[in-house]
Image (cartoon, coloured by chain):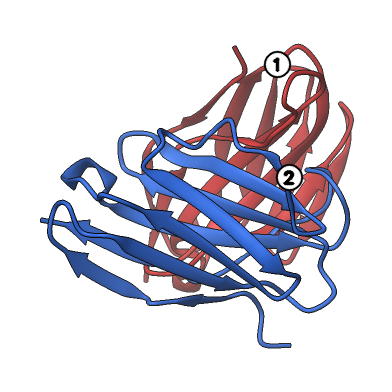
Chain colours: A red, B blue
Amino acid sequence: EDQVTQSPEALRLQEGESSSLNCSYTVSGLRGLFWYRQDPGKGPEFLFTLYSAGEEKEKERLKATLTKKESFLHITAPKPEDSATYLCAVHPAGGSEKLVFGKGTKLTVNP
Amino acid sequence: DAGVIQSPRHEVTEMGQEVTLRCKPISGHNSLFWYRQTMMRGLELLIYFNNNVPIDDSGMPEDRFSAKMPNASFSTLKIQPSEPRDSAVYFCASSLVTGYTDTQYFGPGTRLTVL
């Protein structure tokens, strides 16, 4: 069964304190891995798609990386407006191929 | 672009009542997805339409749930009869091309509470 596990469940940082969120996955094959940001009361907002091990993508203070077993979302010098829940989803190859989401990491950045 | 539009934003109903959730996808998008989000199970796909045709409904929990897409700009998710365990946030998402590969754009969701 395809599985996605995100850690930690919650993370509190001080403004400017860099850290990383983890997304580990178990799939028979990977077509792609997605990162989304979700603010309270809103739908998930697309951040990145990664397709192969070694790939990296950046957007402002965020950088996503991918290995064969996990992905990291690195947050450099975060600001309070980066506070949100970050969701990881995998698009498995084979089977129904529907996206499998992790439960997310709730990030809080204090000023 | 207005993005994906969902209505109502909040719905409170009593057990046994029929509930209809509505979605307008982004114009020109060919794929539409209905998801359910709960604290326990996270975000789960209920059903996927491509060009208005249901392709994958394996996530629909039981016969009480049904979904339709009569045209490219409108979809409904109906629960009849509703039960307290159906309480969740229901999201609609759309994407430009066929399948799960393309970026999915989510609506704001409908928070359903069944008493």
Q: Count residues near mark 2 (Cα–Cα under 10 Å), then give few for <14, some for 14-19, many for 20+.
A: many
Is residue A46 toward the left or the right of residue A108 in the image? Answer: right
Badge 1: chain ID = A
Q: Position of residue A105 (x, y in %)?
A: 45, 43
Q: Residues within 10 Å of mark 1 (few under 14, many from 20)?
A: some
Q: Amino acid at mark 1?
A: Val
- In depth, the one of A7 and A19 nearer the eye is A7
- The quarter of the picture where residue B105 lies is bottom right
Residue B6 in percent (x, y) is at: 50, 74
Instruction: Name the quadrant of the N terminus of chain A.
Output: top right
Which residue is tagged 2? A64
- Secondary structure beneath label 2: strand
Q: Secondary structure at mark 1?
A: loop
Q: As drawn, is B79 to the left or to the right of B93?
A: left
Rendering coords of residue B97 (x, y %): 88, 56
Q: Amino acid at mark 2?
A: Ala
Does the image show residue A77?
no
